[in-house]
Image: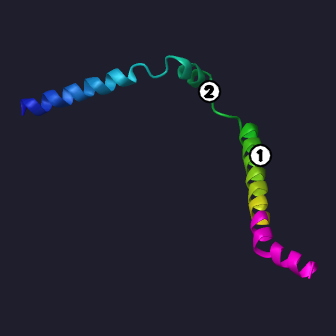
Amino acid sequence: MTDIVDKSWDLQRKIEEKTKHVGKGKYGRVLKMARKPTGEEYIKVTQTVAIGLVLLGGLGFLIYWLFEYGSDMIIRAFS
């Protein structure tokens, strides 16, 4: 029983030692500067992401459509 308790305490110490330095160093400065976005900022970011998704999806569909049906149209046009 003591062996299990000692192992668990050792594991606990290892975990605490690894997490002790979180928030210090180059990533810690970024985390300290981070804050919750305002409603307006959140809406602008969401709109920007949505526009990007629509543009990339449209471009992907256009490329798919050209490969699927564009070659047939070109062959018929020059036949």
Instruction: Give the mark nearest the N terminus, 1 or 2.
Output: 2
Stretch in magenta: 63-79
The image quarter containing residue 18 is top left
The image quarter containing residue 13 is top left
Point out the residue furthest to the top here: 25
Residue 64: percent from left, percent from top? 74, 67
Q: What residue type is labelled 1?
A: Thr
Secondary structure at badge 1 equals helix
Q: In which quarter of the image is the N terminus?
A: top left
Q: Residue 34 carries which label?
A: 2
Point out the residue furthest to the left here: 1
Magenta stretch: residue 36 in it? no
Label 2: how many Cα within 10 Å (few below 14, some 14–19, many 20+) = few
Query: Is 61 rendered above or below residue 37?
Result: below
For this view, does 14 lie left or right of residue 51? left
Image point (71%, 35%), residue name: 38
For this view, does 8 lie left or right of residue 17? left
For this view, does 10 lie left or right of residue 30? left
Q: Is the magenta stretch mostly helix, strand or loop?
A: helix
Q: What residue type is labelled 2?
A: Ala
Image point (39%, 20%), residue name: 20
The image quarter containing residue 39 is top right
Label 1: how many Cα within 10 Å (few below 14, some 14–19, many 20+) = few
Viewer-side residue, 78 vs 27: 78
Residue that carries the numbered disc 1 in the rendered image: 48
Q: Do the residues labelled 1 and 2 touch (CB within 8 Å)?
A: no
Viewer-side residue, 18 vs 71: 71
Secondary structure at badge 2 equals loop
